[in-house]
Image: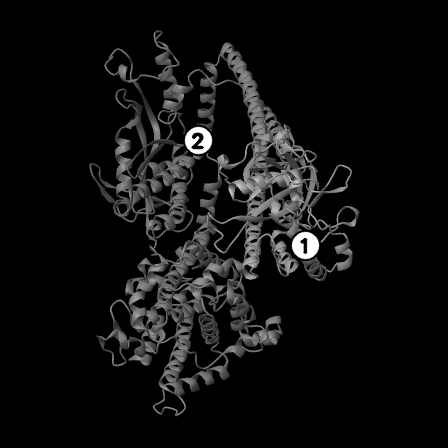
Amino acid sequence: MVKENDSKSDDNSYIKEFDSSASTSGISAFTSSSVASSLYKSRYATPEVAIREQKAVRWSKVLVFFALLMAVSAVATITCIIIMDEEEAEFEYQFVGFASEIVTVERQKADQIFATMDVLSVTIASAAVATNSSWPFVSVPNWSYKVEALTALIGGEEPIITFSPIVEEYQRGMWSGYSMQEAGKWYAESIVAQKKNYTVELLMNGTLPFIHYYDVQNNFMPTPVMGPVPTLPAWEQYPLVTGHRNTMYTNYDMLQFPQVATLFHITNATRRTSMDFNTDIREASNSIMQPIFEGVDLKSKDSRMVGVVWLTMRWLDYFQNLLVEGTSGIVVVLRSSCSRVRYESVDASDQDPAETVVSYLINGPNAEYLGAFDAHDSQYDNLEVTKVLVDLDVDESKIPEGNCVPTLTLHLYPTEDFESRYLSNKSLYYTGAVLLIFGFTSLVFLLYDYFVARRQRKVMNRIVKQDKIVSNVFPTAIRERLYDAQKEKPQDDLMDPLDFEGQTNNLTEAPLADLFPNTTVMFADIAGFTAWSSAREPSQVFILLETIYGAFDKLAYRYGVFKVETVGDCYVAVGGLPEPDKEHMIAVARFARGCMKKMKEVTAKLEMSLGPDTSDLNLRIGMHSGQVTAGVLRGERSRFQLFGDTMNTASRMESSGEPGFIQLSETTANLLIEAELLKVIRPRSRKIQVKGKGEMQTYWLQTTRQQRQPKMVPRLRRLTEGGDENEAALGAMNDDDDWFWSQDSAEETTKSQRLVEWNVEILSTLLQQVIASRKGRVENIDSLSTIEQEIGKGNVVLDEFVPIIPLKRFDPEELRVRKATASVHIGEAATLQLRLYLSNVMSMYRDNPFHNFEHASHVTASVKKLLMRIVDLDEGKVFRRDGSDRSVDLVNLAGHSYGITSDPLTQFAVVFSAIIHDLDHPGVTNAQLLKEETRTAKLYQKSIAEQNSVDLAWGMLMGPEYEALRACIYQTEEELCRFRQLLVNTVMATDIVDKELQELRKARWETAFAEAVPDHEDDVEREDRKATIVIEHLIQASDVSHTMQHWHIYKRWNEKFFMECYG
């Protein structure tokens, strides 16, 4: 036995030496081919072409740099313009918004003032009716109180409101007596209401007992009697003020004011409210005159106008408290449609041709009077917002000639202060950034140009187009002869594509063919490709062939082997041509061995994307040495071809070989023996019958190991489907099978990825059922974040163990929904997070016997199969304790499984526990950990490894990167707690060494399945107790069975255990 092992060791070391040795033929072939190609290219590179190409390159560089400069300039300019336009647009948008707000508020104020004046007019007329007074002998009781209540609606600082009755010429005497009799009454009311320091006696002393006016020397004069012209004496006023020489305005003839006289004539003619625009007093003021009509029916056209109410207030008050603090810099220009009236003139027709306009500056809640002119900045004329503020809509035909009812218009403009809040230097910053990028790009461009220019000193040769056509079809020597033949025709342009078809019928020209006496031909066929490709899409077939043949092409280049062609799934290569090579058989042998190894690597990598049986594909290679005729058959689609008996024999070597083996003809084997490579070949045990050749003795070319027929291991994820064949295959995956376990690091990585993907598939399917069981209900789990953080804090995992886990009750509607889970998906985000989570779990497993990730995957497979054998939801069948297999009503299904199959979350939690139950297991018993006094032993005391696994897995699952995955697992507090409790109980059940815990489990089993039912338990609690203990025994059975390793032992043990539980 020792000798045999030593012999194998010698063979393997010799094979390694054979693989690592540099083949003279491969190197020489590659070198000679490269040299020939370089010489061939340099033959056609003339100095004139080089100079012309260099100039073209220089000019192209200048053009590129100039184009880059222009592009950067354009980009910088456009960037600056766009940003400035955006800021300008934002500035305009904000201004229009604030302007619209100002206009809206001002219109509301104006409407409120007119409505208030109308209410005051009705109040005065109603007072006359209520007191049964005749006009003009009317006084409003509680005048100050009523007006004060209305002025709150008008706003502003001390608006002046005056009530003036119309006194005819014949009523003057009676009015004088009435005014002196009643003035004291409303003086007294006003003093109290307005809290003035006046006395009634003082005010009566300043009251003139006749209707009067003031002359130019401010001397009061009685209003002259000028025919039937009425007077308009000031009567009740608000606020109560004194005039010149402490006299009262009572009995002052208001018609002596030009503005009032104009308003009175207009109001009297139109019987409607009138107003004017005054810029001579109180900065700029607004006068509104509201008519008062006699009687109760104020809307009647026959009602007589018996008086007016006159309101005067500053325009500045209109523009207060319009905007919020911080919004400043809006100019409001108020224009009147009427020309300015001079205050000094008594004649209302004496108008100033100057425009009636005032300007105000709005700064947040404050307003500032700028003057009786247009104060806006002309640069903002294009942003003007113009809206009509007041339009009394008076019939102009009724207005007395020479008078005018103004239409007031608001014109709003921004200022530089307002604009500065939205314009910044951001455009300059961005422009500077673009220029910096251009500078960096230019530097990179110059560096790149320097390195490229240093490497590429020569220009492309003149026949680059022809070389592209034939470079992958013909060997270098054949290409040279083709070019030479084409060059001899002066009428053809060498820069045009080659035309080989025209040479087919010219028998005077020598054919492009040569005899190569010493070559080795290799045929490589993909075994199983026909059956594999019949179940694949065309794109998948070509992905496989392109990947495999691409890898072979690289090997051919490396070993100096010439690729002849590919026919379907057959790859043909030859050594010893076009450049003769004495060691052609060594180069091809090394190439064949490399192809065999590369085939395994490629198919293993492609298995995840092309299907589980892709790695079952294998290579069957045949080799034969001898002479071949090689050349180009000129004509349609001409190509380089090989002819001769050597090709036929090499093909027979391949077809009569075995998958995964390299079969050599006796000729090739003898050549390798002559090259002192006897130890890498083994004679075939029997001769083979070759068509056209008879019996032939062939040989096997050994690879890096003692070859034998390999086992085809199916994809692990099919193992849960049941069946003896799959079980036997899974059982073959053990340490005794050196073919399976003796793989390189790339294959080990691929195997781990397969295990992860297989577990992802199982858990994804269970999660689909969990989602389907919610009947489309989706809730936000953000509210559970606090509960997630609190779970497990302040106690160890074992303290959370409970003997009874309340499971979800059976719902027939939910079961029907779950049977249609094909249309339910957990989502791409959850799938990616599940794959990431399992990958991290895999990385946290240690490489310990019986406690590694592969062991966890086996336990997962066992748990899944046992859950499936409890009940098959698709078939509606249940395995009974009496061994029968008969259909039952789905409504009673949950009772047969103790409620386990009623809740997909329960199944998911059990399978999930199987995956993580040995996470970070140190490979020693809990008792040993206690002896060593490790950190975890001090923390947990009992079930150390199991509690540590739960804490690690749970802590990782609670990470923010797995939020979508957690949302699939649970969405309510009840689901979260149930999932946690199932996880704790299931993982803790894997500690079968602790005698105390085992005794407790046995006692709980006896209690759960005892014939005598405790009085304090109802049916639901008893069923939950059974389900809890069954789940613990499921994970125990699966965990213990895999530690037996051999599948046939597990199978028998599992069968007995199942029959014991359910048979």
Name the amino acid type tagged 1: Gly
- Residue at image position (29%, 14%) is 510
Dot 2: element: helix
Q: Residues within 10 Å of mark 2 (few under 14, many from 20)?
A: many
Residue 280: give x, y in percent of width and height: 69, 37
Above or below for 612 versus 424: below
Numbered disc in front, either 1 or 2: 1
Residue 167: give x, y in percent of width and height: 61, 47
| Quarter-of-image position of residue 1039 | bottom left
Residue 387 horizontal side relative to residue 178, left or right: left
Residue 244: give x, y in percent of width and height: 77, 46
- Residue at image position (26%, 20%) is 635
| Quarter-of-image position of residue 589 | top left
Image quadrant occupied by the N terminus = bottom left
Is residue 396 shown to the viewer in this render? yes
Q: Which sits earlier in the primary sequence, circle 1 or circle 2?
A: 2
Q: Any mark on residue 25, and which?
A: 2
The residue singled out by tag 1 in the image is 177
Name the amino acid type tagged 2: Ser
- Residue at image position (57%, 47%) is 290
Q: Residues within 10 Å of mark 1 (few under 14, many from 20)?
A: few
Dot 1: element: helix
Image quadrant occupied by the C terminus = bottom left
- Residue at image position (49%, 34%) is 397
Viewer-closest of 244 and 617: 244
